[in-house]
Image (cartoon, rainbow, N blue to C red):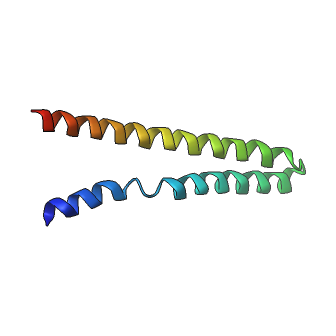
Amino acid sequence: MADKRSGVMKYMKYSVIGIEMAVSVAVGGFIGYWLDHFLGTEPWMLMIWVIFGIAAAFRSLFRISKQYLSENKENENQRSD
């Protein structure tokens, strides 16, 4: 039972990828919208900060997928030993 639970917990941390990507873009959009409103530069800050949010989302996706691949490689090495 503990082995099954640890397998589920191992993959639960990867289930937040979509949420993390959406939040990154939304936060970038919010910052850009606020700066546009404050500085009167519509729509430039919004576009720039949305691009920053997209970049942050892909950076996060890359980091999480790299971690996932390294964990799978370690598991393969343990199985072959």
> Which residue is situated farthest in the bottom direction here?
1
Q: Looking at this view, is 59 or 73 the one in front? A: 73
Q: Residue 78: horizontal and vertical position, in percent?
A: 14, 37
Residue lying at 57% horizontally and 52% vertically, measured from the top left: 21
Query: Quadrant where the N terminus lies?
Result: bottom left
Q: Quadrant of residue 64?
A: top left
Query: Seen in the image, is 7 located left or right of residue 20?
Result: left
Left/right of residue 4 with respect to residue 43 in the rendered view: left
Q: Residue at x 57, y 45 (%)?
A: 57
In this orientation, which residue lies closer to the viewer: 75 or 56?
A: 75
Residue 66 versus residue 49 in the image, above or below: above
Q: Residue at x 72, y 53 (%)?
A: 29
Q: How many numbered dots are placed on residues in this image?
A: 0
| Position of 2 relative to 60 (above/below) | below
Residue at 14 percent of width and 63 percent of height: 2
Q: Position of residue 3 (x, y in %)?
A: 15, 59
Please state if 34 lies on the left or on the right of 54 as rendered: right
Of the pair 28 and 18, the residue shown nearer to us: 18
Name the spot of residue 60 as percent of width and height, x first: 50, 43
The x and y percentages for residue 34 are: 77, 57
Q: Outermost residue, left direction?
A: 81
Q: Is residue 38 above or below residue 59?
A: below
Q: Quadrant of the C terminus?
A: top left
| Residue 51 placement, left or right of 4 | right
